[in-house]
Image: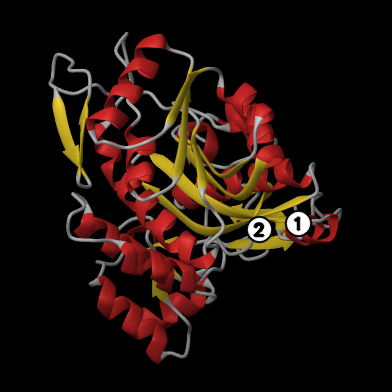
Amino acid sequence: MEREEGGIVIEVPESRDGASEGTGDDVFFNPTQELNRDVTVAVLRAYRDREPRAASYLDAMAASGIRGVRAAAEGYDVTCTDTDADAVALARENLERNDLDGVVHQQGCNAAMHEGLFDVVDLDPYGTPIPFADAAFANARNLVCVTATDTAPLCGAHQRSGIRKYGAVPQNTEYHPEMGLRTLLSALVRTAARYDVAATPICSHVSRHYVRTYLELDGGAQAADELIDELGFVHHCEDCLFRDHEYGLIPSADRPDRCPRCDSNRLLVAGPIWLGAVAEPDFVRSVREAIDDGMGEAARARRLLDRVATELDTPTHYDQHRLYKQWGEPAIGMDEFIDHLRTAGHEATRAHYHGTAFKTPATIPEIRAAVLEE
């Protein structure tokens, strides 16, 4: 079946429900990832203004070739790789269908990355990207784009799997989408540092059931060390919802065993996770400006990027409904809620993770005092 997306037309396999979702024997194509791909195109446009020398793009797991085709339509020198012969043929056909140049290889992406250098490497696997991260950071020049769809291990719902894959202990809290993003960033930053590469997240988001991040690369051990210093641990009380964080690759020996606020013994420790900024606001604004009305998810992409650009970069976000449930009070509207916090003198923004997510450096007692009439 033919599908139009972002001004290009591609052939995709048709499954029983009319679209391939990446399962079964068909070539992988997921229509629900159009938002991801629209934002990717906008990032590629914005990044070319930031780094005009960035020209080559690797679609590391091409499948239908949709990412590579869209990157080629933006003027990038595209290489597509896939191990599946049907996928390779389909990706090649889709480039030709749109009169676009590109190289398509039937090859594992790790081998392709070790054989050549690319300015931009895009990893969009089904599941974890970790098996491909070493090759990407060792052989990309400027930008590595990463999707992870294994959100249960990342956020701590499948904790043992998260520990094995990401070398960190994630905890399943009410801010689990952010836990997943920060767990992924921790693993990627540490992987890049092994090659004396600093991988700085300049745009990141969690949407539906995936995490997506874009990391700009800078060579040098000192730069990599500076990012390692942005890793650390979050302490979270399951009873009163207190949380705090500390920097370092090892939790401090004098960390409390009980909650310092309510004395509960249900104090979770997560880490080492990324505690730094997950995006660069000015770059995210330029990405937002690069969204055009011809994109199928333009409206959603603009709303998402507006939120990412303006949210505070402190870990971690609160869930307004979870707090009101804890207090036994009916929740008020989010805009009014944020206004109350700001009126009380606290920095506060909404967060992109979901509709009732917000960020503030205020403590929970300070939040309560600001939004509830005593």
Residue 218 shows in this picture: yes
Q: Determine the residue positioned at 49% across, 20% down.
A: 105
Left or right relative to 226: residue 75: left
Residue 207 placement (x, y as % from top left)? 35, 47
Dot label at residue 256: 1
Name the image quarter holding residue 320. Answer: bottom left
Q: Quadrant of the N terminus?
A: top left
Give the left or right position of residue 266, taking residue 232 as reference: left
Residue 144: % across, % down: 56, 46
Instruction: Kindly identify the amino acid type of the residue bearing the numbered disc 2.
Output: Cys
Q: Residue at x 78, y 61 (%)?
A: 223
Mark 1 and mark 2 residues within 8 Å of each other at the beta carbon: yes
* Front residue of 162 and 14: 14
> Is 362 displayed left or right of 110 in the figure?
left
Q: Quadrant of the C terminus?
A: bottom left
Q: How many marks?
A: 2
Q: Which residue is mark 2?
A: 259
Residue situated in front as seen by the camera: 260 or 126? 126
- Circle 2 SS class: loop
Secondary structure type for disc 1: loop
Q: Amino acid at mark 1?
A: Pro
* Residue 296 position (above or below residue 19): below
Q: Is residue 343 above or below residue 350?
A: below
- Where residue 34 sits, quadrant-wise, is top left
